[in-house]
Amino acid sequence: MKQGISKVTEQGVIVNCRAILSDLDGTLVDSQFCVDYSWQVWAEDRGLDLAEVMRVCHGRRTIETVKDITPHLDAQTEVAFLEELEATCTKGLVPVLGAHKLVAALAPHQFAVITSGSHRLASHRLTHTGFTPPRVFVTADDVINGKPHPEGYLKAARELGVEPSQCVVLEDSPAGIKAGNSAGMITIGIAAHSGEHDISHARYVVQDLTWLRVFQEGENLKLELKALTKAD
């Protein structure tokens, strides 16, 4: 089977791959309330422009957003403040539609989570919503460069033993999609929780994970995307 080849059918598009690499927040787990709440509390406490904070924070590591917005403050102190807010919040924290079914269809060597959150925070969100943290689990603690840099996705592919061109990336943020594209992977934007962010630079865009179906074909995967928008 040729990897990364898309075939158009009446039902949508079929993509052949070896592994699915997924973002966490907004892709597998709806954590919007907790994320927005934490940044709002931080912005108000520090006297910052909330609109500007919200414009740049999604899909990136907290430390990079903090350094960009408040270079005059101690980054580690600010990150610890934000993480404590997020890691103790469970309000509105639920799996994205179709997430459990998708993950259940994949073997451990076919799936990874790559998130801009810390290991503590990401583990909290996964376990609270009924997921077991995967064997390949790349968090903000594991990389030097966060999204939109491709480091996290390339690291996950190496740990799975899969070529980047054989990977599909699921993302809901512009930074994450840019990271996947830069890694040479096929990107699928998940629109349900992307808000007003432009995710049209993904190879394909679907509403949520119920629009995807996974089929096992030996060591390969066949991913069917139905009722999709192609982002050329």
Image (tube, rainbow, N blue to C red):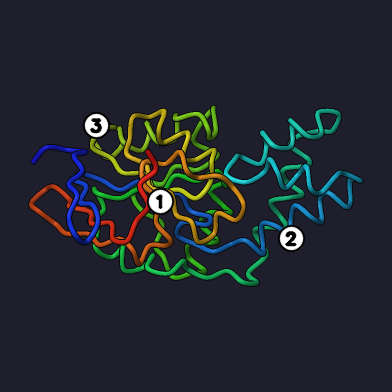
Secondary structure beneath label 1: strand
- Marks 3 and 2: CB-CB under 8 Å? no
x and y percent of residue 83 in the render? 68, 51
Using the numbered discs, state the Cα–Cα distance from disc 3 to disc 2 in whole angstroms. 38 Å
Furthest-right residue in this view = 47
Q: Earlier in the sequence, mark 3 or mark 2?
A: 2
Query: What amino acid is labelled 2 in the image?
Result: Tyr
Nearer to us in this view, 166 or 207: 207
| Disc 2 to disc 1, C-alpha distance | 27 Å
Residue at the image point whose x is 76% and y is 44% from the top: 53
Q: Identify residue for label 2.
A: 37
Residue drawn at the location 25% of the way across and 49% of the way down: 110
Residue 205, numbered circle: 1
State the residue in front, 197 or 181. 197
Which label's residue is closer to the chain start, 3 or 1? 3
What residue did someone put label 3 on? Answer: 163
Of callouts 2 and 1, the N-terminal one = 2
Q: Residues within 10 Å of mark 3 (few under 14, many from 20)?
A: some
Element type at mark 3: loop
CB under 8 Å between discs 3 and 1: no
Residue 120 spot, x, y in % from top left:
57, 52
x and y percentages locating residue 181 in the rendered image: 40, 33
Depth check, mark 2 against mark 1: the one in front is 1
Q: Find residue 99 and report its horizontal and vertical position in percent.
A: 38, 65
Residue at 12%, 48% in the rendered image:
219
